[in-house]
Amino acid sequence: VIDIRKLYAQTGTFTYDPGFTSTASCESGLTYIDGDEGVLLHRGYPIGQLAEQSSFMEVAYLMLNGELPGQDELAKFNTTITRHTMLHEQLATFYRGFRRDAHPMAVMCGVAGALSAFYHDSTDITDPKQRMIASHRLIAKMPTIAAMAYKYSVGQPFLYPDNRLSYTGNFLRMTFGVPAEEYVVNPVVEKALDRIFILHADHEQNASTSTVRLAGSSGANPFACIAAGIACLWGPAHGGANEAALNMLHEIGRPERIPEFIARAKDKNDPFRLMGFGHRVYKNYDPRATVMQKTVREVFKELNVSDPVFDVALQLEEMALKDDYFVEKKLFPNVDFYSGVILSAIGFPTTMFTALFALARTVGWVAQWNEMISDPEQKIGRPRQLYTGPTQRDYVPVDKR
Ligand code: ACO
């Protein structure tokens, strides 16, 4: 029974749009995507230019404040973020409650939510200053949280942030450094990872960002909202695709097996999909994938490594883009297709890939959350439904059923 007429009478309008393929949930001045042309702009700046020329901290500032920072503003912003990189010491105890083999996303989800229990002083969402402090805290602490999740999984001691290093250099050291040795940050790897963070910083109203907005629309505190975003990002159709894409490339293993996997992806009776391919909005090449592919080459050259999965990826892309199925459905590589190859070359295990995505996307999440709360038109998000269950009926006691 669909009471669509009643709903229409109540609201004057009613749309049924599963997956929100054509419904805007908000107004936003942060990110623009033209999926047909493969264009992605943050506050008007093309992603290619930001990835090549700026830094993740500049992009974070841009997303939060609307304009690129001047030199002094950037220095001040770096200092502010650096001051917030530490986690409350008691949170280390919290980590120890997880099983050692817990997925880092499970840990990140829990620890990000637990920040609400430690930083009460920045949870008054009606105060813009407190909202900004909470945003800075989240951006600053996310690398510490992710690195600690990694250290916990490999049984190594946690490393405190070294605030003499850059945001990304500090994260590399907290992840791969060990207490007894000096860790020297490789500038090419640092630049590559910083660029990956830029490429993941925001992507308008994707599933996890919409989750953050929906959670935030009820007035929930920012730490809880970001934990909700992390939970949503984890899914293989969203942020989990980078892990799934690399696993798939390994499973394919050698170029001769590519046609078999392409055939499986086209088979309607097989649930298999080419991971890292296709996008709800891009019906053209994802501009982030272009930068990713280039970055793979730079990292391989610097580290003097190669990986047969990169050749598999390149050939898979070439063959898929010539295949009628992928051409007709406009399925192109997305940001996740090549990111795993780079992250793996740097030394991250696949289970950390989505955690890195969450770290970077925190910038977009907090910027979107701030934008939403500042909007005077903001209302609690409350989608409607088409009811398809039974009509009213009388309860029958259990002994009569
Ligand atoms: N391999 C094979 N076929 C595909 C793929 C794929 N990767 N992606 C979509 N299709 C097909 C679908 O089977 C469907 O075919 P049909 O029309 O004959 O039923 C058609 O293309 C449209 O696909 P939908 O799932 O309806 O498109 P939607 O916009 O809902 O999904 C999504 C987009 C989830 C990204 C999808 O392309 C997918 O599952 N890709 C693989 C997972 C992935 O890479 N996700 C990362 C997305 S980017 C990000 O989150 C950072």
Image (spheres, helix red, strand yellow):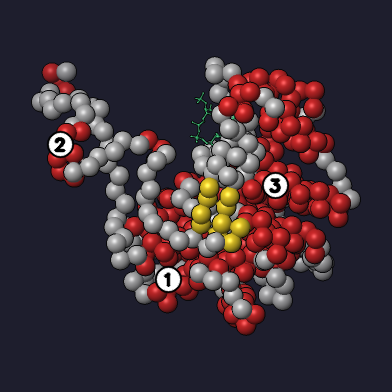
CB within 8 Å, label 3 to label 2? no
Q: Residue 286: x and y, percent?
A: 62, 44
Residue depth check, mark 1 versus mark 3: number of the one nearer the observer = 3
Among the two numbered marks 1 and 2 on one chain, the one whose residue lies closer to the N terminus: 2
Q: Residue 303: x and y, percent?
A: 86, 53
CB within 8 Å, label 1 to label 2? no
398 sits left or right of 306 in the view: left
Q: Is residue 24 above or below residue 171?
A: above
Question: What residue occupies the far left of the structure in this picture?
Answer: 394
Compare residues 213 and 157 and report the one nearer the observer. Answer: 213
Q: Is residue 79 above or below residue 330?
A: below
Among the two numbered marks 1 and 3 on one chain, the one whose residue lies closer to the N terminus: 1
Residue ID for mark 2: 6
Question: What residue occupies the far bottom of the structure in this picture?
Answer: 72
Q: Is residue 137 visible?
A: no
The answer to which image quadrant residue 42 occupies is bottom right
CB within 8 Å, label 1 to label 3? no
Marks 1 and 3, how far apart at CA: 35 Å
Residue 290 - label: 3
Among the two numbered marks 3 and 2 on one chain, the one whose residue lies closer to the N terminus: 2
Amino acid marked by disc 2 = Lys
Q: Residues within 10 Å of mark 2 (few under 14, many from 20)?
A: few
